Amino acid sequence: MASSVARLRSVVLDCPDPLALAAFYAGVAGGTPQAEDDDWVVLQVPGGPRLAFQRAPGLTPPEWPRADRNSQQFHLDFAAGSTWEEMDAAHERVLTLGARPLDLEDREKKDFRVYADPAGHPFCLCRIDDP
């Protein structure tokens, strides 16, 4: 195995309102947003990655699931439990936080559901048998 060049520090999301989007993800994954200034907010997810949010006025959200123009580029996956009851509860909570459903296809076909966060970035709630 090759040695690493660097250690991943943050996943950064552009957004019109960094504090609001950090608060949304704190509601999803935990942690407390720390505003460094009006343009940069950091969220250390407990037991997980550091997410950062930077102000991007005029942001054009991805057009999920398009790949031909303005593609999603990346998305975040969250383990929402191992049962459909846990998934249903997580679904209700992210909707209450401000998520918008993008793909709620039949659970017989997929073990995940796709949403847009309040800034329009896609993310998934995944049913994981062994979280």
Image (spheres, helix red, strand yellow):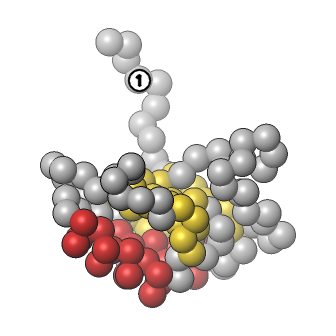
Q: Which picture quadrant has residue 28?
A: bottom left
* Residue at figure coordinates x 57%, y 82% from the top left: 20
Report which quarter residue 90 is drawn in.
Answer: bottom left
Residue situated furthest left in the rendering: 130
Going by the image, does 49 lie left or right of 101?
Answer: left
Locate the N terminus by quadrant.
top left
Q: Residue at x 67, y 62 (%)?
A: 14
> Quick one: 25 or 70, which is closer to the camera?
70
Depth check: give the residue in front, 42 or 27: 27
- Figure check: 1 above or below 47: above
Vertical order, 117 against 75 (above or below): below
Residue at image coords 35%, 64%: 45
In the visual, does 62 lie left or right of 58?
A: left
Q: Position of residue 83 (x, y in %)?
A: 19, 63
Report the number of discs: 1
Residue pointed to by mark 1: 4
Q: Considering depth in this image, is 94 or 21 the residue closer to the camera?
A: 94
Label 1 amino acid?
Answer: Ser
Secondary structure found at label 1 = loop
Residue drawn at (19%, 59%) of the image? 82
For the residue carrying disc 1, how many other residues have a C-alpha within 10 Å: few (<14), some (14-19), or many (20+)?
few
Among all residues in the image, which is located at the extreme bottom? 96
Q: Position of residue 31 (x, y in %)?
A: 34, 73
